[in-house]
Structures are given as C-alpha cells and as structure tokens.
C-alpha cells in the first residue's frame, strides 16, 4: 500500500518535469521529493520516471499512474470544496495569445480587480497556450476549439484581420492595387516553422506564395516592424492602431477565439464570473474586434 500524499508528489514531478520544479510548487526540498518518488515506485513495484537531458520523462506505467492521479486530484479538490461557500476569491490564471491578452484582456483587468478585490488574476499572454488539463491555467483563450473531452469549450468572439503598413512606407512604395501585386512589396509575417497554430497561416489566404522578408514568432513584434516602415503585414484589426489598412475590401480575414476550462471548475463561482466577464469585455470591444461589422 502506498501513501496517498506520494501520489500528489508524483503528479507534481510529472507536471514540472524535475524534482526542483515540483519542490518549489510543493514548498519542500528536492531531496524530500526524490525520496518520496523512490518510495512511491517501490510501493507500486514499477518505474514511473526516467531521466533525460530535458528532465524526467514518464514511462508507460508512469503515464497510466499520472492519468489516474489527475482524476484523484480532481476528486480531492472537489471534496475539499464540499461545505464551503463558493466564494469569488483566490487566484485565477488566464492564458491567451499575446495580442488578445495585451490589447483586450489586460486593459480590462483593473476594473475587474476593483469590482472583486478578493480575486487575484494572473495573465499568461504569449505565443502558444498553457493547458487547463495539466492545471497550468484555469481558463485559456485559444485560436482553435480544443478537441478534448476533458475540457469545457465555448465560442468567445470572432475577430477580423487586415493588411497594414505605415504611412511613411506606403508613401515611399505606393499602394498595391491587387493582392497579386504584393510580391513587389516587403512582407512581414510569421516564421513558418515557429507557427504554433494553423489559424496563423494568413499569407496564402492573401495571395498564394507570399513569403515574409522580415519574420517573427511574435505578432506584437511584427506590428513593431510594420510601424517602423518594414513592410506590409497581416494583423488583427484590434492591434493595428494608426497603421494604414491596405486593400481593405480584398484582404479581410476572419478568425474566432474560444475559451476552454476543466469541467470540474467550469461552474465554480469565480470561473462563472470570469467567463461572463470575458463575454462583456468582447462585447464592449466589438468595434475593434470586428470593424467591418
């Protein structure tokens, strides 16, 4: 028989990928984590973790134990909430793309904090997304609807993208009349092998074969390049600001944001608040998200 607390420590190591990362999360020292993992493996008579240059990797047995451990952790969390008031407080972590996180979510957070001072919000706004199923975040805003039975997924909002350049750049080069003319202009876009979601492959929709002469994995960096007279690029309209839109009737792309949460927390008071708040935020910014209506 094993100590149930050893299962909790194993889950932390599996998620962190190292004894040190798990120790920081759990508030203990790495040596203690190592001893508890050894004891856990001995009790189960199975090797659960193997060392690799990048940290620990799960064995096949370890993957099965992690799956059951996450279920047990969810059940324990639910048990601890029994009999407690469903208060809107504590820490909530949101993951979103850097543009949506910086331009839409971040400016609205101070007002939410003023309304709910007991709520502490952490915003992870970057390329790529953190995972609710791995308990990295409570709610994630994604570019594509996650296809997982372990997540509660809802549509959040459509948004529009257009082709933009700086006024100075266009004064120097002139304005293209048709998408097929764009091969004569400098193009700013994503680095192809660093694109983390198929929905970000914009350029072939504008005109097949367009290739960036200046690329970045960051959409905010792309905007900065365009603003510094670096060329023309596709941007979400909500971050374009004072840039000049080019071929507005011919280059009009649509994408959608989705929200995803774990089913065990979806209907808690703070997640209900957060989901409703996000809907209010996108409604208030509808003209920025979808300028063409």
Image (cartoon, rainbow, N blue to C red):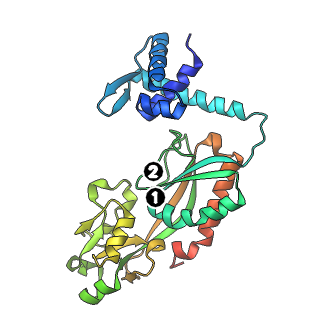
Residue drawn 53% across the image and 43% down it: 132
| Disc 1 crowd, CA 10 A, few/some/many (<14, 14-19, 20+) | many
Compared to residue 98, the image places residue 91 above or below, namely: above
* Image quadrant assignment for residue 81: top right
Q: Residues within 10 Å of mark 2 (few under 14, many from 20)?
A: many
Report x, y in % for residue 65: 49, 23
| Residue 10: mark in rendering | none
Q: Residue at x 53, y 56 (%)?
A: 258
Residue at 75%, 46% (x, y): give it: 87
Question: What is the quadrant of the N terminus in the image?
Answer: top right
Question: In which quadrant will I find the C terminus?
Answer: bottom right
Taking the view exactly as shown, the residue that stands out farthest to the front is: 29
Check if mark 1's residue and mark 2's residue have beta carbons within 8 Å. Answer: yes
Tell which of 4 and 20 is nearer to you. Answer: 20
Q: Which residue is mark 1?
A: 97
| Residue 73 horizontal/vertical position (percent) | 59, 30
Q: Please tell me which residue lies in front, 166 or 211.
A: 166
Q: Is residue 212 visible?
A: no
Number of marks in picture: 2
The residue labelled by disc 2 is 129
Up-down relation of residue 50 to residue 165 (above or below)? above
User: Which image quadrant is residue 227 in?
Assistant: bottom left
For mark 1, give the secondary structure: loop
On the image, the x and y values in percent for residue 147 come to: 49, 46
In this rendering, position of residue 93 left or right of residue 130: right
Q: Mark 1 to mark 2: distance in Å?
A: 7 Å
Instruction: Give the structural element (helix, strand or loop) at label 2.
Output: loop
Residue 2 occupies quadrant: top right
State whether residue 58 appears in this view. yes
Tell me which residue sits at (39%, 83%) in the image: 244
């Amino acid at each position: 028989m094993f100590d149930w607390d050893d299962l909790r420590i194993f889950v932390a190591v599996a998620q962190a990928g190292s004894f040190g990362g798990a120790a920081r999360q759990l508030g203990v020292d790495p040596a203690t984590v190592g001893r508890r993992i050894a004891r856990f493996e001995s009790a189960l008579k199975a090797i659960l973790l193997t060392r690799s240059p990048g940290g620990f990797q799960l064995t096949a047995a370890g993957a099965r134990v992690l799956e059951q451990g996450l279920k047990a952790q969810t059940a324990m969390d639910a048990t601890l909430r029994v009999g407690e008031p469903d208060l809107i407080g504590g820490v909530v972590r949101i993951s979103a793309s850097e543009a949506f996180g910086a331009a839409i979510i971040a400016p609205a957070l101070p007002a939410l904090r003023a309304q709910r001072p007991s709520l502490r919000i952490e915003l992870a706004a970057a390329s790529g997304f953190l995972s609710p199923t791995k308990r990295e975040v409570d709610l994630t805003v994604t570019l594509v609807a996650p296809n997982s039975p372990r997540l509660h997924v809802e549509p959040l909002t459509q948004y529009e993208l257009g082709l933009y350049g700086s006024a100075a750049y266009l004064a120097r080069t002139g304005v293209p009349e048709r998408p097929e003319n764009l091969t004569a202009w400098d193009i700013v876009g994503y680095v192809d092998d660093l694109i983390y979601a198929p929905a970000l492959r914009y350029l072939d929709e504008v005109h097949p074969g367009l290739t960036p002469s200046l690329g970045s994995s960051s959409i905010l960096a792309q905007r900065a390049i365009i603003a510094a007279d670096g060329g023309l690029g596709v941007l979400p309209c909500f971050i374009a600001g004072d840039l000049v839109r080019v071929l507005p009737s011919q280059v009009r792309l649509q994408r959608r944001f989705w929200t995803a949460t774990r089913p065990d927390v979806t209907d808690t008071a703070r997640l209900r608040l957060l989901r409703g708040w996000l809907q209010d935020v996108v409604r208030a910014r509808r003209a920025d998200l979808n300028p063409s209506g």
